Image: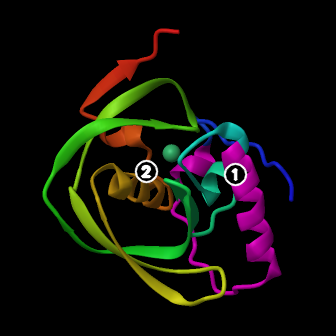
Amino acid sequence: MALRNIVKMGDPLLKKVCRPVEKFDEKLHQLLDDMWQTLHHAEGLGLAAPQVGILKRVAIVEWEDQKFELVNPKLVKSSGRCVDNEGCLSVEGFRGLVARPETIDIEYFDRHGNKQTLHAEGYFGRVFLHEMDHLDGILFSDKMIKKIVDRG
Ligand code: ZN
């Protein structure tokens, strides 16, 4: 495993639409393993492949000791609306209030190519939506309704 550099806002890589994964091979597993190491080192909740400079539809989420590896994730259903505070490992110096659906159903593939489905609500679902936005070149700062500046 290797720690990868996290791409920061302003880098054009974060604005690209990522390509679907076609091969569930050793290279994908290596990417996922490296992403976990990078996420834990940065102490975040989630990380998307473009944040480590790889333009593939891959993201990881850690929530209450559960680890999710999302390959080619797709939002299949959503309802409601809630506004909450978000930050991003690629965005330094500020957070923001973002409106997102309250409940979601997603489909994705695991690292072995098995299809998975997941229902999520509240902040748990928000983390998935944030990571999935990265795969389409969207940052929370592109859709925030209020900017919150960190005062260190
Ligand atoms: Zn992010």
Q: Is residue 16 magenta?
A: yes
Q: How many marks?
A: 2
Amino acid type assigned to the residue bearing label 1 in the image: Val
In primary-sequence order, the first of circles 2 and 1 is 1
Does any atom of ligand 1 lie closer than 8 Å to the CB of label 2?
no
Residue under the point 44% across and 61% down: 132
Q: Which residues are magenta?
A: 12-40
- Of all residues, the one furthest to the left in this rendering is 80
Q: Is residue 99 above or below residue 27?
A: above
Tell me where residue 142 appears, x and y as whole percent: 37, 40
Q: Is residue 68 above or below residue 39?
A: below
Q: Nearer the viewer, residue 50 or 70?
A: 70
Q: Image quarter for residue 56?
A: bottom right
Residue under the point 53% across and 9% down: 152
- Residue position marked by numbered label 1 in the rendering: 52
Residue 7 — which label? Answer: none
In the rendered structure, are the residues bearing label 2 and label 1 in contact, judged by CB atoms less than 8 Å apart? Answer: no
Residue 138 — which label? Answer: 2
Does any atom of ligand 1 lie closer than 8 Å to the CB of label 1?
no
Q: Image quarter for residue 144?
A: top left
Q: Secondary structure at mark 2?
A: loop
